Image (cartoon, helix red, strand yellow):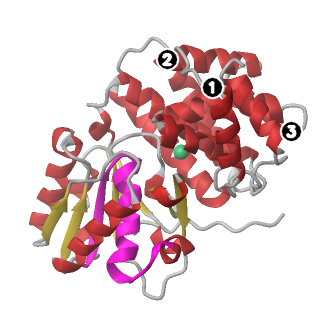
Amino acid sequence: MEFTFNMPVKVFFGKGCIDKNSSVLAGIGKKALIVTGKSSADKNGSLKQITGALSTEGIKYERFNRVEANPSVETVREAAQIARDVKADFIIGIGGGSPLDAAKAIAILASNDLDDDGLFSGVYKKKPLPLIAVPTTAGTGSEVTPYSILTFRKISNKKSIASPEIFPAAAFLDASFTETLPVDTTINTAVDALSHTVEGYLSAKATDVIAPIAIESMRLLGTSLKKLTDKTAPSFSERENLLYASMLAGMVIAHTGTTAVHAMGYPLTYHRDIDHGRANGLLMYGYLRFLEPASAKVKDVIYAMGLKDVDEFGSLMEALLGKKEEITDEEIENFTDTAMTSKNIANTSPSPTRDEVKKIFQLSFGK
Ligand SMILES: [Zn+2]
């Protein structure tokens, strides 16, 4: 047996965890730049709790609230300039995957002058500013990963930064912030978490130590997703389960990275504006069908989720995601080319050829 396990994020989980642990913030810095989307952090109560804790600890702060869905390189550059101007010495990201991923890139650019290649290189002369993560969706797992996924217009796709330097210093996970999420967002984000744990478990980089974490995450998500097929809002304890499972899934991909599903999902999001989690959910059945003959581990996924076979997995995704988008043959060709340029393809075990990626697209969109 051989593995490396690195999880340097101090995680605080539970209702009111920010209030109860505000002194952690005092140990990080004296001036924070809070990074959020437009208004969700105001509505779900997370911003108020963070600003309350900062006031308690006598920490000054400014806010940047212009992070869009699938944040762009341009946006993180703008925010990093503000971080410099206000002399922030740490960053607090509050939100779904977009503000959290943006906060990581902002932390890098606030302390390093970098062109685009330098930003995506993952190697930095100066340490990025320390980062606090407050997830308000249960799906991205970004609070425990060393990744930041940005929209990079130069390549007309999404591109990831991977660096152990952007692991948050601490993460506060309070499921009450997810209570205002609509059911469809709850489903899409939970499906994203599922794709993380499934892809991580089946990846070429899977290790013994992440296997039980992945299996537990699949078990919890399997139960929750079945309940979500009735499209009613989950209870608080159900929301805690989702947040916990999504964090576990994040810990899995922190070690394994993602695979073909994410590589194929990015062009669907970039070109067709399909939500990230939904894009992954649409592709996962075809992906499991492709892997099934070659990977005995597919059965572990199915059983962990409490299902009997890959077909039942497909039915569950259909019940959750509803009518699929129409994708043309030309789009499939283009998206296949784009997916093949992603390094996540090689991380799939076994790694699919171009024809196989195209087949997964075709199977996923009923072609
Ligand atoms: Zn994802």
> What is the span of residues highlighted in magenta in the rendered image?
89-116
Look at the image and tell me whether residue 238 can be seen. Answer: no
Left or right of 82 in this view: 187: right
Report, in whole angstroms, how far the alpha carbon at label 1 lies from the one at label 3. 30 Å
Hey, what amino acid is under mark 3? Ser
Question: What residue is drawn where x is 26% and y is 66%?
Answer: 79
Query: Is disc 2 surrounded by few (<14), some (14 to 19) or many (20+) residues within 10 Å?
Result: some
Amino acid at circle 2? Lys
List the residue tagged with mark 2: 227
x%, y% of residue 307? Answer: 70, 20
How crowded is the residue under tag 1: few (<14 C-alpha within 10 Å), some, or many (20+)? Answer: few
Q: Is the CB of mark 3 within 8 Å of ligand 1?
A: no
Q: CA distance from mark 1 to mark 2?
A: 33 Å
User: What's the amino acid at mark 1?
Assistant: Thr
On whether ligand 1 comes within 8 Å of the CB at mark 2, the answer is: no
* Residue 72 visible at all: yes
User: Where does residue 156 sit, x and y in percent of width and height?
Assistant: 52, 52
From the viewer's perspective, is the residue at label 3 or at label 2 nearer?
3
Q: Residues within 10 Å of mark 3 (few under 14, many from 20)?
A: some
Q: Residue 176's quadrant in the figure? A: top left
Q: Nearer the viewer, residue 329 or 28?
A: 329
Among numbered discs 1 and 2, the one appearing first in the sequence: 2
**Mark toward the start of the polypeptide (3 vs 2):** 2
In the image, taking residue 289 as reference, residue 22 lies left or right, namely left
Label of residue 328 in the image:
1
Q: Is residue 118 above or below residue 267?
A: below
